[in-house]
Amino acid sequence: MPEKRCVRCNATLEENDNFCYNCGHWTSHGYKYFKNKNNTKVLMGSALKQSNRVNYLIILFLISIVTFLVCINIRGLSLFKPFAYLKKEIISYKYGYNSSLIKSNNIYNNKKIESDDDAISNIIYDSDSQDWLCSYDKKVIDIERRLEKKYGILSVSFCDISYEEASKIENVINNTLDLFPNIYGQLTNITLSNSKEMGEYVAYFQPIYRFINGSSDITKYNRVNKTQILLNSYYFLNIDKTKSIIDSKYNSGYYVKNGNMESLIAHELGHYISFVTLLKSNNINNTRFEDINNTLAINNINNTINSGSYAKELALEALQGKNIETECNKISEYACTKRNDSYIYEEMIAEAVHDYYINRDNSQDISKKIVSILRSRL
Amino acid sequence: MKNCINCGAEIKKMDNYCRKCGNKIRNNGYYIFVNIVSVLLLIGIILMVVLFVLSYII
């Protein structure tokens, strides 16, 4: 009997082969075998389904790409909010207190900044690009937008602060800044922040924070500076846990009497208002955009702040020859803070504003005097 | 001696195709890879949709 061979590849076949073992081509035996419809079910085994699965794989891959592109196009980075939420929950569980994921200390170098508009858009972008790290609460967002609009603040970011707490903060800001005229537009940020050390500060004012190109050559790169108030997440996200710390400070007379945690923001606003009067006395509108033309003036402002000379001059004007130790102690212990045996007059001024915010007509005379001087300089 | 996963017929060592049903002989790793990747892609699509919905809620 002649050898059976495949008509395509000429491989030697066995008598009962339906397909060539080498190239898979039909054989004459296979043709006759599968003419019987009962035998065709042999072809529909699991391997066929497995082979089809390759097609499904390709389709699935394309669907997943399209789904991802559609989702990211609609939501942007906010798509990853659930991951941020999960990370915050893990941190809370691990350390026992709530923390924020946003960074208030971003610094960039060697970046092209052409104008004040560039500076503004970069400051806003730095905050907006971190929105996805924060929980969504429309009422808190509304408060942020109101404050931005009313006081010309470029970005207010309360992030995960509760609505109740954000309302209290809004109240403090309104009731403090409304006491002073012409303070629109110098503050760039009010933002939640994680301090490096837990409990380092409740709130903190940074008059000139070197945000962009701080360490680059001013002749090559213009700079962007933030003027910002930071709210420590350790306190503002853990009200119940930190209440006793704050209460003890007030009860001991360290801070102005009758205050609370939120009123400490009035203290920081006192620093801000003092800073604005310093700018006005130097005919500077704001320090956010720094180029070769105004870098000297801004550096002078920085040096003046660091030396404390402006604050000292203001405080002495308010004291009118009275004993500083006696007068600052009337406000609070914190108003008499010293560094290297010298008074930090900025703290006295800020605590005076804090005192006036809380106690108004019942505030100390020295506080009223300082507030009056600040108003006159605005 | 291996068996065809489609029809169960015996496969000889050098066979590229099953002699009975014509199924192309692939190693197990191929089928494992295709199945696992399919499941992963499906999970990925579901996860994407869930993420999308959750991003509006959280």
Image (tube, rainbow, N blue to C red):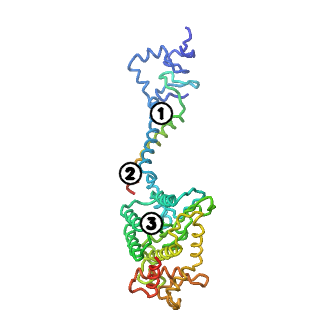
User: Label 3 belongs to which residue?
Assistant: A153
Say what amino acid the circle numbered 2 marks: Val
Secondary structure, mark 2, is helix
| Marks 1 and 3, how far apart at CA | 56 Å
Say what amino acid the circle numbered 1 marks: Val
User: Label 2 belongs to which residue?
Assistant: B53
How would you rate the neighbour count of disc 1 (Cα within 10 Å): few for under 14, some for 14-19, many for 20 or more?
some
Subunit under mark 1: A
Instruction: Give left or right: position of A89 versus A301.
Output: left
For residue A54, which numbered disc appears in the image?
Answer: 1
Secondary structure, mark 3, is loop
Q: Earlier in the sequence, mark 1 or mark 3?
A: 1
Q: Viewer-proximal residue, A245 or A123?
A: A123
How would you rate the neighbour count of disc 2 (Cα within 10 Å): few for under 14, some for 14-19, many for 20 or more?
some
Subunit under mark 3: A
Say what amino acid the circle numbered 3 marks: Ile
| Marks 2 and 3, how far apart at CA | 32 Å
* Mark 1 vs 3: CB contact within 8 A: no
Q: Viewer-proximal residue, A43 or A349?
A: A349
Secondary structure, mark 1, is helix
**Compared with residue A34, is residue B3 higher up or lower down, i.e. above or below?**
below
